[in-house]
Image (tube, helix red, strand yellow):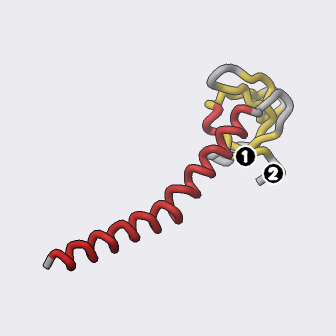
Amino acid sequence: MQNQWIQLAIWFLLFVGIFYVFIIMPRKKQEKKHEELVEALKRGDKVVTIGGIKGEISKVKEETVMLKVSENTEIEMLKKAIAYKDGEQ
């Protein structure tokens, strides 16, 4: 009976290990890459937001950026809302 519990525990630990390697590690790597992107944003960068808005950064603030989306239009976006730099996906 105790042998069955040990075998069950081993299978459970194996499942948790596989889950961690294939789900959690890649997600953490992706989050770290996005954090580096956000920290490296500077004036003049062309970016795309998670909502699909394309624009050029005109001003970088602590938590937000001003995004120039047309000649006379700027919108303020959270830095976290930047998906990627245009052309670097």
* Residue type pointed to by label 2: Glu
Residue positioned most to the top: 61
Q: Position of residue 87 (x, y in %)?
A: 83, 51
* Residue 89 image-quadrant placement: bottom right
Residue located at (80% from left, 29% from top): 42
CA gap between label 1 and label 2 equals 7 Å
Question: In the drawing, does residue 5 fall left or right of residue 81?
Answer: left
Question: In the drawing, does residue 20 fall left or right of residue 66?
Answer: left
* Residue 8 image-quadrant placement: bottom left
Query: Which of the two residues, 12 or 27, is positioned nearer the viewer here?
Result: 12
* Residue type pointed to by label 1: Tyr
Quadrant of image for the N terminus = bottom left
Query: Which of the two residues, 70 or 30, is positioned nearer the viewer here?
Result: 30
Question: In the drawing, does residue 46 fall left or right of residue 21?
Answer: right
Residue positioned most to the front: 3
Residue located at (20% from left, 73% from top): 5
**Which disc is residue 84 wearing?**
1
Q: Position of residue 60 (x, y in %)?
A: 74, 23
Mark 2 crowd level (few <14, some 14–19, many ≥20, 10 Å Cα)? few
Pointer 2: what residue? Answer: 88
Query: Which of the two residues, 13 or 25, is positioned nearer the viewer here?
Result: 13
Residue located at (76% from left, 32% from top): 41
Circles 1 and 2 in contact, beta carbons < 8 Å: yes
Q: Position of residue 19 (x, y in %)?
A: 45, 65
Helix, strand or loop status at disc 2: loop
Q: Position of residue 47 (x, y in %)?
A: 77, 41
Residue located at (46% from left, 68% from top): 18
Using the image, determine if residue 46 lies above or below residue 42: below
Question: In the drawing, does residue 60 fall left or right of residue 14?
Answer: right
* Residue 13 image-quadrant placement: bottom left
Helix, strand or loop status at disc 1: strand
Using the image, determine if residue 49 lies above or below residue 59: below
